[in-house]
Image: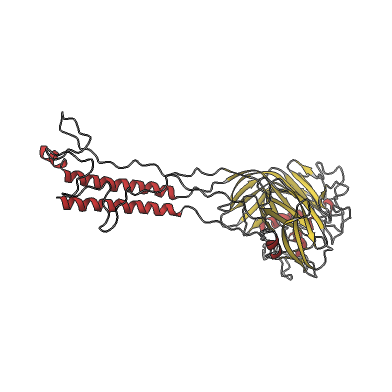
Amino acid sequence: METTRMHLSSPRARRLAAGATAVALGATIAAAAALGAAPANAASADVTDASLSWSLSNEANAGAYFGGCNFLSAGVAGNSGASAPWTATNPSPGYAASAGNVSIAYPKAAGGTSTPTFATKCQTGDGTTVTPATSTRGVLTLAEGTGTVDAAVGTADIAWDGGFTVAFYGGLTYWSAEDPELHVAADGTGELTATVSGYAASRDGGSWAPLTPRTVHLATLTDVDVTSTGITVSPDWQGVEPASATSLNKTNADWGSWPADFVDFQNETGQSSYWYTSGANDAAAKKPQPISIAYTAAETPTPEPTTPVTPEPTEPTEPSEPGTPEPTTEPSEPGTPEPTTEPSEPGTPEPTTEPSEPGTPEPTTGPTTGPTTEPTTAPTTPAPSISTGGTTTFTVGDSVPLRAEGLPAATVYSIVLHSDPVVLGTVTTDADGAFATSVVIPTDTPAGAHTIAVESSDGTAVVSLAITVTADGTVVVDPIDTTTAVTTGAAVNTGGTVSGTSALPWIGLSAFGVVALGSVAFIAYRRRVTQQD
């Protein structure tokens, strides 16, 4: 045992042990750096004020051949007892423009909205009675939705409390939806579901019986763009072909249907053919209108991991003989003062740091592992932009989603259609300088090039979107408004998202570098030990 202790106390063994320690420390630092290299997870942001606005379809707000019109009502309507038009007192609860978190509004041609009543539910926001060829363009809004969104990953889970009712032919047939839920996956697919209930009925006043409540898809979604301020998306329609859509007509190139389980349910309410193309020219009336959701995301990111500060490795000291105090430095040969660093070759002053490869100037300090905290990228304010959420074509008279960001916070703007100015509405930006709303291009808008502008109180356009109206009333959103981009510096888009690059890739290289430097240090130790021994 004594021989072994003396061997471990030799300078050569100590230097080998120190070299091994350096490698171990290098590996530890590398592992810590690798952990620091992983970017903080973009944690889901809590949402407590999500507002969903939707017209469902033009048909759901159109004039009817009997009963006055089809209409939306806030709240879940009671049992009227028979297939008959509603009255002011039956069903109970009956018609309502607001109920809890749910409200109904009718847009005006010159901008703004009006609140309908039972007496005016079949009139436009300007007071004109609708016909089977026209629509009130009623907008249903569900407020105070709660959940989480993750704009970086592209996911969202939001739920609303409250219900609404959809009545056709003045109430001969109606159904209700409660507590909608939105789910969006990272691949951009999503669904809007709700619990539906209603009554087995027919438009000719036939059968009447309560239906079993069930959960169905109000909308299936594709290519959903989840942003930090909202979502605007057109539900799937074109090419959707439920098995129960027995009278589906594919003559129109835009033929389609609402989700299959939704159509199954409507087969029982007596409204089935109003939710898919059953004629050659009814696609524009029956297809789902865009859904617009706005919210304020209260981000709660995961704390950024930091690289732990590792003390500089020091030469381990060998335990001394029993009863002998251990010197704080290595003992030198008998009669020779012990240097504070490893002895160099005879006649050569010992450098204060490890020698580099021959011909390379020795650094005055040892290698570093980079900063001990992650560098951060200062947040940047996005350029003003305006989007229709990916909707590139629609028809005059449709309710069109509109979303903008990069504007001053808490500021009132007017949305104006040019060339002949027509105010489509007013909005107020949120705390992030964004807004989400819906506007209607008037049906009498002449064919040609037009611009939807967001204007400040002095009439200055801060951002705009170019559109073209064709002779048949189709509205095409131009991909880029070059005039706005040049004159105002605003970015114009139709719903795309640009993601920045990571500011952290150097961390991974630092971890690799620490391992490499640890290996070099060990090789240097071995080389010196071999030369000295």
Residue 363 falls left or right of residue 14: right
The residue sitting at the top extreme is 323
Residue 117 falls left or right of residue 355: right
Q: Nearer the viewer, residue 323 or 363?
A: 363
| Residue 279 percent location from the top left of the image | 77, 67
Q: Nearer the viewer, residue 371 or 225?
A: 371
- Which residue is found at the position 80% from the left and 45% from the top? 97
| Residue 420 percent location from the top left of the image | 83, 62
- Which residue is found at the position 74% from the left and 59% from the top? 275
Q: In this orientation, does residue 199 appear?
A: no
Q: How is the image coloured?
A: secondary structure
The residue sitting at the left extreme is 3
Residue 509 falls left or right of residue 190: left
Picture mark count? 0
| Residue 345 percent location from the top left of the image | 17, 50
Q: In this orientation, does residue 357 appear?
A: yes
The quarter of the image holding the N terminus is: top left
| Residue 174 percent location from the top left of the image | 78, 51
Residue 487 falls left or right of residue 33: right
- Which residue is found at the position 30% from the left and 50% from the top? 518
